[in-house]
Amino acid sequence: MKLWGGRFTKPTNQLVEEYTASIGFDQRLAEEDIRGSMAHVRMLGACGILTEEETKTILSGLETIRERIHRGEVSFSVENEDIHMNIEKLLIEEIGPVGGKLHTGRSRNDQVALDMHLYVRHQTVELVRLLVGVQEALIAQAEAHVDTILPGYTHLQRAQPVRLAHHLLAYVSMFQRDIERLIDSYKRVNISPLGAGAIAGTTFPIDRHMVAEELGFDEIYDNSMDAVSDRDFLVEFLSIASLIMVHLSRLSEELILWSSEEFGYIELDDAFCTGSSMMPQKKNPDVPELIRGKTGRVIGHLVALLTALKALPLTYNKDMQEDKEGVFDTVDTLTGALALTAPMLSSMKVNVEKMRENAQSGFANATDLADYLVKKGLPFREAHEVVGRLVLHCLEQGKTLTDCELAEFKAASPLIEADVYEAIQLERVVDARNISGGTGRQAILAAIEDKKSKIDETHTWLDHVIS
Ligand code: ARG
């Protein structure tokens, strides 16, 4: 007999049962569902809607079911459709008909919304924790490589030399924005929908604030129709997750490129690579490749949910059941990627010489020679032209700017003097960019301190937040 069977004259078609059931995936919400039910029952007791005896019986029944689920003793059934009705059925089996009082003043519509709020709140906090871990791994490498210089690229062509720390800190900044987005979204997640009932509230004199407080919510939804049909918080979660994956994917792409023989900038630790079944020499960067590859599915989940919601009339529609698998898969994908990225970064070896060689062997100091001429009074546009011609000359001769004789410099522009060699020397070039946000040594040291204090702020948030 179905929990909602009263109005029906026939059993459900078997295929319909399988098609509409969500228990296959929403059993992941068992803990949240029981926590929510316990808070609801305590409130019903406190408001005199259930007797003290009934309240105690239902609470201990729920506790027993929670333990049985933890011990793996429970098998959920498709006939009971979803986690909410499975647990209610188990409760009634456990404590008898009084278990049927659990659902007083509640609907699965506000119940499922509550479960998802609890679930996403916890995952939001866990993602912040993992992101800080990645930031810390990046900062540690940055501190070890303040004086490692490599070419910075635009269009994947050597552009200007930068400190490796500067390059890594760019990712710390990206992940900082991700953390701030998650922290900001938390306040839209941490709202209780319970008490909205199916759509319009309930006739019982329940205390919505009491449940909200017990579950650690900051406030309650102020409109019951919004409460049961709002999935914005899931869209926001998937959107933030997509952007984090995009950031991880860009980082992964660089790790893949940099560990190629062509670049030879880094070597990923053996523990984070895999081999080829045919080619004995191969050591493949599968982990960053998979992170890059899995980014598509997370973005897909965001698009799928937006599409599912776009034409839904108020309020609850069964389409909304489609919100779950994408969110769960996103959590798994992102958690896996973040958990691997931190140790992969900490354990990678940097080929300092190769980076320096590439920074030196090209024309990454060409802008500096132009700036040198500008400081001697030449308009920048003319300086650009002079240096361009000199670069062409060097390419023909197979040399770099630093290899040029003073006479060659003079032939390019009489403004150039012997001090040019110092002006285009690698460290000088890098440290000439000491403005804040630049790649100069002092600027980098200040940036590291700044990021560390942001990390401290995140830890303080993590220490106090309810998850
Ligand atoms: N399994 C449903 C879901 O995930 C729970 C809510 C069902 N509500 C309903 N009125 N059928 O959305």
Image (cartoon, helix red, strand yellow):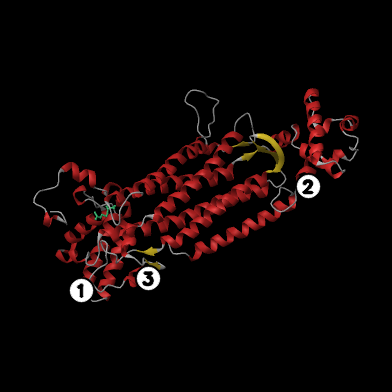
Disc 3/disc 1 C-alpha distance (Å): 23 Å
Disc 3/disc 2 C-alpha distance (Å): 56 Å
Residue at image mark 3: 213
Residue at image mark 2: 432
- What amino acid is labelled 1 in the image? Glu
Residue 293's x, y, as percent? 47, 37
Q: Residues within 10 Å of mark 1 (few under 14, many from 20)?
A: few
Disc 2/disc 1 C-alpha distance (Å): 77 Å
- Mark sitting earlier along the chain (2/1): 1
Which SS class for mark 2? loop
Residue at image mark 1: 53
Q: Is mark 3 within 8 Å of ligand 1?
A: no
CB within 8 Å, label 2 to label 1: no
Please say if 226 is above or below 279: below
- Mark sitting earlier along the chain (3/2): 3
Q: In the depicted view, which residue is nearer to us: 53 or 211?
A: 211
- Mark sitting earlier along the chain (3/1): 1
Q: Residues within 10 Å of mark 3 (few under 14, many from 20)?
A: some
